[in-house]
């Protein structure tokens, strides 16, 4: 085999892996609800026939499962089994549980912890308040491009401007596929969030729900706290009040995070 042939084969293999990972992320973005074949094709930009072949192979390997009743694809059992070995030694979600519980008690609404994973934010923990109408916009394990959801938007707000712009540019094509946002709308929301000291979105995915978010640590955010509620509960005054509570908890967690990482050094 010539060097050129070897390079072409290697590139083809890399592209196949990239496609597979992208497809898993798209399927995971809908959580337990799952996605139809046509939706997977639309979100990935791949031909339907290609998506069908890949999903069939992934189903055979246990990476996804197809539910016969709905014909939707969801994350499969093999990923859970492999994930048991990949548990991080430092669990941010566990350390944040008291803060989430306190915020849920203070606000009576739903509180989320979102952790940054490259271009995306993943919901790693959730606490429910006592208000009877709950904004359950995320399940634990759901991942979305940074900018969709108050947690991911808060992370963009806390990043250096140049880095945030790179992420928005990279995620731009995905915003419209997964929400009613665009890259320009996300940029505007980031500008507003930096000015007010917290991120805010109203109905980016589910109409009638809104959320406020704050990232931590400042300047180099790895995660964000957010409070979601029905939109009428987050008028301008209450948004500011919730934002202040989130900043307070985020500052505490940033200090704990710094101490924990120093102790592991």
Image (spheres, helix red, strand yellow):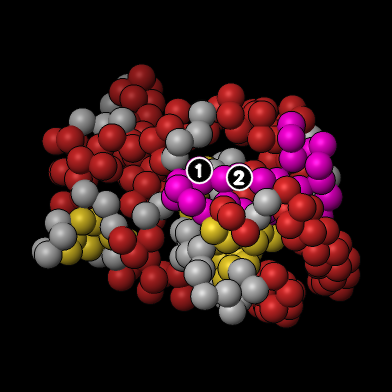
Query: Does residue 111 appear to the left or right of 54 in the view shown?
Result: right
**Rendering coords of residue 192 (x, y %):** 74, 35
Residue plotted at (74% across, 31% down): 191
Q: Is residue 168 above or below residue 265?
A: above
Q: Nearer the viewer, residue 95 or 81?
A: 95
Q: Is residue 3 magenta?
A: no
Which numbered disc covers residue 201? 2
Residue plotted at (51% across, 29% down): 182
State which region is magenta. Answer: 191-218
Q: Nearer the viewer, residue 179 or 13?
A: 179
Q: Nearer the viewer, residue 120 or 238?
A: 238
Q: Nearer the viewer, residue 195 or 177?
A: 195
Residue plotted at (69% across, 40% down): 156
Q: Is residue 4 above or below residue 210?
A: above
Query: Does residue 122 appear to the left or right of 36 in the view shown?
Result: right
| Label 1: element kind | loop
User: Circle 1 is placed at which residue position?
Assistant: 204
**Rendering coords of residue 148 (x, y %):** 54, 44
**Rendering coords of residue 260 (x, y %):** 82, 71
Residue plotted at (83% across, 50% down): 218
Q: Is residue 122 above or below residue 105?
A: above
**Rendering coords of residue 196 (x, y %):** 81, 42
Quadrant of the rendering where the C terminus is positioned: bottom right
Q: Is residue 208 magenta?
A: yes
Circles 1 and 2: CB atoms closer than 8 Å: yes
Quadrant of the rendering where the N terminus is positioned: top left
Which numbered disc covers residue 122? none
Q: Is residue 216 visible?
A: no
Other-residue count near label 2 (Cα within 10 Å), few / some / many at <14 / 14–19 / ≥20: many
């Amino acid at each position: 085999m010539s060097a050129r042939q070897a390079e072409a084969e290697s590139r083809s293999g890399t592209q196949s892996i990239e496609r597979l990972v992208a497809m898993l992320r798209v399927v995971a973005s809908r959580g337990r609800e799952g996605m139809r074949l046509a939706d997977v094709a639309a979100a990935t930009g791949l031909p339907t026939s290609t998506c069908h072949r890949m999903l069939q192979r992934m189903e055979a390997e246990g990476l996804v499962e197809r539910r016969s009743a709905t014909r939707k694809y969801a994350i499969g059992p093999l990923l859970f089994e492999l994930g048991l070995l990949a548990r991080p030694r430092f669990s941010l979600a566990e350390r944040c549980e008291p803060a989430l519980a306190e915020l849920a008690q203070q606000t009576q609404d739903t509180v989320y912890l979102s952790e940054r994973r490259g271009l995306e934010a993943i919901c790693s923990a959730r606490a429910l308040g006592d208000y009877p109408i709950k904004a359950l916009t995320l399940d634990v394990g759901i991942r979305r491009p940074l900018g969709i959801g108050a947690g991911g938007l808060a992370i963009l707000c806390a990043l250096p401007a140049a880095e945030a712009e790179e992420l928005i540019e990279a995620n731009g094509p995905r915003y419209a596929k997964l929400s009613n946002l665009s890259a320009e709308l996300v940029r505007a929301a980031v500008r507003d969030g930096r000015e007010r000291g917290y991120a805010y979105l109203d109905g980016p995915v589910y109409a009638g729900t809104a959320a406020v978010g704050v990232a931590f640590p400042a300047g180099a955010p790895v995660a964000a706290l957010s409070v979601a509620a029905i939109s009428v509960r987050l008028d301008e005054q209450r948004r500011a009040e919730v934002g202040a509570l989130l900043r307070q908890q985020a500052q505490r967690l940033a200090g704990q995070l710094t101490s924990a990482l120093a102790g592991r050094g």
